[in-house]
Amino acid sequence: YCQFKAMLSGDMLEISQQRFLFSFLTILIVLGFEVDSINSVQFSNHTGYEHWKGQVLTADELHVLYEGITLNKVNQYDYILTGYTRDVSFLEMVVSMVQELKGTNPSLVYGRWHYSLYLSEAAMTESFTVDQYVPEDLLPVYREKVVPVADIITPNQFEAELLTGKKISTEKDAVEAIDLLHAMGPHTVVITSSDLLSPLGDQHLVALGSQTTVGAGGTKEKQQIRMDIPKVDAVFVGTGDLFAAMLLAWTHHHPNDLKTACEKTVSVMQHVIKRTITYAKGRIVVPPYLNIFPSGPFETEIKLTVLVPPVVSVGPVI
Ligand code: ADP
């Protein structure tokens, strides 16, 4: 029984990575979502390999699919989640679909994961080829059209810096960048990873989250948290995508409690990553996408600190 309907558009439809997509969808389904997925590309393998072949969905082809959904009146979505896009017309089509669907369902939530605006962090590691760099002309589209219609965004530090034009060197800078992103539209912003040094040492990864909510009587409240996440000594592909999907699902289950939503999101991340590593080393035979939810309490080793106790200010309802 699926209560909520989400539309997902993603880039990770490499055939050799479909197990990853499958795990991604399965987790959302387990969390109660009915998911329609649109493959924005279908590639033979990840583009980090020497060779890759496949097809890219054009903006017009995306519109044809959307038209079919609309004609049959099966376009009542509660959530839309989209990922990496390197084409301006495709991105603009997504924005117009989101705007139209928000007209049908004003409470629809649009979450956006990976930006890869120009050079993703991974691209800087030389494992990526030049043609994977996203053209710079996408940046204004993200800033002026995509972020303003997004409700939840999950940029990494590099993407947050590009979107805001603000260099992040300290936690204070990060909080200011997050506030700039809020001012652009989204009520929930999580910087999923950063170069900031954790108070727990260099074996921890710092992520920062912030959520504005509207309390009784139209008062605006804000919760900001820092997450000190134990680092696993490996580089993963697709973690940003999984994080965004989990955050979307857990903010649905805990709509006004970012701390709990992040705690559960990061807990799932830790379980998936640790199982993936164990699986990769051939120590277990259980696919990593099974049994990722701990039967007991959620991961306790993740430290979440509330940076800003709920700040109450009277303002217009966003
Ligand atoms: P991307 O750059 O793909 O957007 P991030 O690097 O920001 O993704 O990672 C997203 C999340 O994945 C992090 O918040 C963290 O929970 C998890 N993660 C990624 N890499 C690691 C790692 N090496 N160790 C622990 N957690 C990780």
Image (cartoon, grey):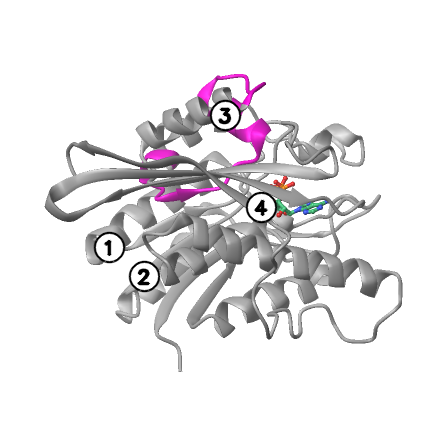
Q: Identify the mark nearer the N-term, 1 or 3.
A: 1
Q: Which residues are magenta?
A: 147-170
Q: Amino acid at mark 1?
A: Ser
Q: Which residue is mark 3?
A: 174
Residue name at image x 63 percent, y 27 percent: 196
In the image, farthest residue toward the right: 282
Residue 269: image location, x then y, percent: 62, 55
Residue depicted at x 64% and y 69%? 292
Q: Is residue 191 visible to us here? A: yes
Instruction: Give the mark nearest the N terminus, 1 or 4.
Output: 1
Cα–Cα span, label 2 and label 1:
7 Å
Q: Is residue 297 above or below residue 148?
A: below
- Classify mark 3: residues with Cα within 10 Å, few (<14), some (14-19) or many (20+): many
Mark 3 residue element:
helix
**Which of label 4 and label 2 is nearer to you?**
4
Q: Secondary structure at mark 2?
A: loop
- Amino acid type, mark 2: Asp
Residue at which label 2 appears:
78
Is the Cβ of the residue at disc 2 closer than 8 Å to that at disc 1? yes
Between discs 3 and 2, the one toward the N terminus: 2
Residue 169 covered by magenta stretch: yes
Q: Give the label on residue 280, or none.
A: none
Q: Is residue 318 visible?
A: no
Q: CA distance from mark 1 to mark 4?
A: 32 Å
- According to the picture, the residue beneath numbered tag 4 turns out to be 303
